[in-house]
């Protein structure tokens, strides 16, 4: 443009900020103020850009400009300024801006309270909320913010106190507030209270249903989760991507293939099939439901694939004992330029373990450091399982002793199971002692060690293990299975 006026500058700066070009937005602002005066929209856009960049120097530059202009008295600009300083880690500056404001609204109070929460000062933030209540009536945003913070702290008592406040002030009909209440009760172990709030809600949106479904899954009540899904559909609530990502793991856990297929059909009708996380969840669901072919079909139809997509497919092949295809898929992933992460390596080593590919599995384990990934305890456990399954028990024992961290009961237990299957009594005796010394409270390992000692004829040791279990109050849980019959679990 040959001629630029203030409107041109303001439009471009705001546009850059909205597109996420925050540095460009700030640089243009610096040029603009030499010739023109920005408007309020430009100031707020630049402040948000500073908050995203978390650049305290830029934040102070914009603030200094505001002090030299009339914007220092604008409530909206100051509210954003409070938030900006908080995100830049300068809580004192946020408090100072708030203290010097001539006119404060609910957003001002909410911004400062959230500033304290962002910087880990929950008690101070809650005390400020009390001060807000003595000055003005909090809005629904205030209560949702307090409830969210209480959820993070698992402070159910504070949640109950806020719940009483919301009822007294008439927010009990507010959907967003009720959603926050359902969430805090669920995550604080009060599933009955969570469901009570849910049932008493006159209006429910898709977030409400997503929250309560997630709560059911969190407390392993997947049967209730599936019933909630049916209720949601019967009440005509349109699911979103988050709903699908909540539902599909339930089908995976229950191996509810038919219901999973119906949900897949719903995903196709709603156009969610192009969403990468949804595709990943479908691969996992079909794999868990015994349909590798459908997992492959979903994988092949996905136009975009991330590392989770590839890892899910590798795991699926591994679960079905096709380590060769898992290895091939890992190679294809690398060929497309997708870098493997910890979980991808874990999946391919797991696949090698279930297919007897010892050399390949060890090679992937040793390659991790070349990819600048330090093996974690689960990778070491997978290698132990790999060696143990192939009867290389002495190598597995040596590998455990060479680990840079202390082996836990799961690693020793993997080796012990292999010893029991192969009849290697010498290693079994040594491994059993290692597990006992770890003083694990896992019933399964105690039973396994007891059975090994019984097989070795060491009945004194068997009695010792049984007494130890009684002293710890450990009992063997009965096994159970879920089955899908006529679309019901």
Image: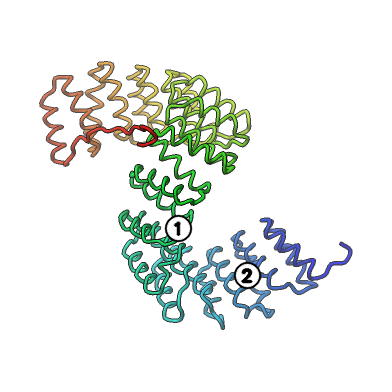
Q: Position of residue 406 (x, y in %)?
A: 33, 36
Position above or below: 41 against 272 = below
Q: CA distance from mark 2 to mark 1?
A: 43 Å
| Picture disc at residue 368 | none
Element type at mark 1: loop
The front one of 407 and 6 is: 6
The residue that mark 1 highlights is 204
* Figure quadrant of the C terminus: top left
Element type at mark 2: helix
What's the residue at 49%, 71% (across, down)? 110
Position above or below: 13 against 484 = below
* Figure quadrant of the N terminus: bottom right
The residue at the far bottom in this view is 102
The front one of 109 and 335 is: 109
Q: Position of residue 410 (x, y in %)?
A: 31, 33
Q: Position of residue 407 (x, y in %)?
A: 33, 34
The residue at the far right in this view is 2
């Amino acid at each position: 443009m040959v001629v630029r006026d203030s409107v041109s500058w303001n439009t471009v700066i705001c546009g850059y900020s909205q597109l996420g070009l925050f540095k460009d937005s700030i640089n243009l602002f610096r040029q603009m103020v030499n010739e023109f005066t920005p408007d309020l929209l430009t100031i707020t856009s630049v402040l948000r850009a500073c908050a995203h960049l978390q650049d305290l120097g830029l934040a102070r530059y914009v603030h200094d400009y505001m002090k030299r202009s009339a914007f220092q008295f604008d409530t909206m600009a100051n509210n954003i300024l409070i938030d900006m300083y908080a995100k830049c880690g300068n809580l004192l500056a946020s408090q100072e801006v708030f203290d010097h404001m001539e006119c404060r609204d609910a957003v001002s109070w909410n911004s400062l309270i959230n500033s304290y929460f962002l910087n880990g000062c929950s008690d101070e933030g809650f005390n400020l909320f009390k001060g807000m209540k003595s000055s003005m009536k909090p809005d629904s945003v205030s209560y949702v913010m307090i409830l969210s913070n209480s959820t993070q702290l698992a402070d159910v008592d504070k949640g109950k106190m806020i719940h009483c406040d919301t009822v007294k002030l008439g927010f009990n009909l507010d959907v967003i507030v009720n959603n926050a209440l359902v969430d805090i009760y669920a995550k604080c172990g009060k599933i009955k209270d969570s469901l009570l709030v849910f049932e008493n809600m006159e209006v429910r949106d898709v977030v409400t249903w997503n929250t309560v479904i997630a709560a059911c899954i969190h407390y392993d009540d997947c049967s209730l989760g599936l019933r909630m899904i049916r209720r949601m559909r019967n009440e005509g609530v349109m699911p979103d991507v988050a709903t699908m990502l909540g539902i599909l793991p339930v089908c995976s856990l229950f191996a509810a293939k038919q219901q999973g297929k119906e949900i897949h059909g719903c995903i196709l009708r709603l156009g969610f099939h192009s969403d990468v996380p949804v595709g990943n969840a479908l691969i996992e669901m079909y794999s868990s439901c015994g349909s590798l072919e459908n997992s492959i079909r979903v994988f092949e139809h996905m136009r975009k694939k991330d590392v989770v997509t590839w890892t899910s497919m590798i795991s699926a092949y591994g679960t079905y004992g096709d380590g060769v295809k898992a290895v091939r898929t890992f190679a294809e992933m690398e060929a497309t330029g997708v870098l493997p992460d910890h979980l991808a390596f874990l999946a391919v080593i797991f696949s090698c373990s279930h297919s007897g590919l010892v050399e390949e599995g060890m090679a992937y384990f040793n390659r991790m450091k070349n990819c600048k990934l330090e093996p974690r305890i689960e990778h070491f456990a997978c290698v132990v399982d790999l060696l143990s399954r192939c009867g290389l028990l002495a190598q597995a024992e040596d590998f455990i002793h060479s680990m840079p961290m202390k082996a836990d009961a799961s690693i020793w237990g993997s080796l012990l199971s292999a010893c029991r299957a192969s009849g290697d009594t010498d290693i079994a005796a040594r491994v059993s002692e290692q597990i006992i010394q770890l003083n694990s409270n896992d019933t399964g390992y105690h039973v396994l060690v007891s059975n090994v000692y019984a097989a070795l004829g060491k009945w004194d040791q068997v009695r010792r293990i049984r007494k130890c279990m009684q002293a710890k109050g450990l009992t063997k849980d009965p096994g159970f299975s879920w089955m899908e019959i006529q679309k019901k679990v």
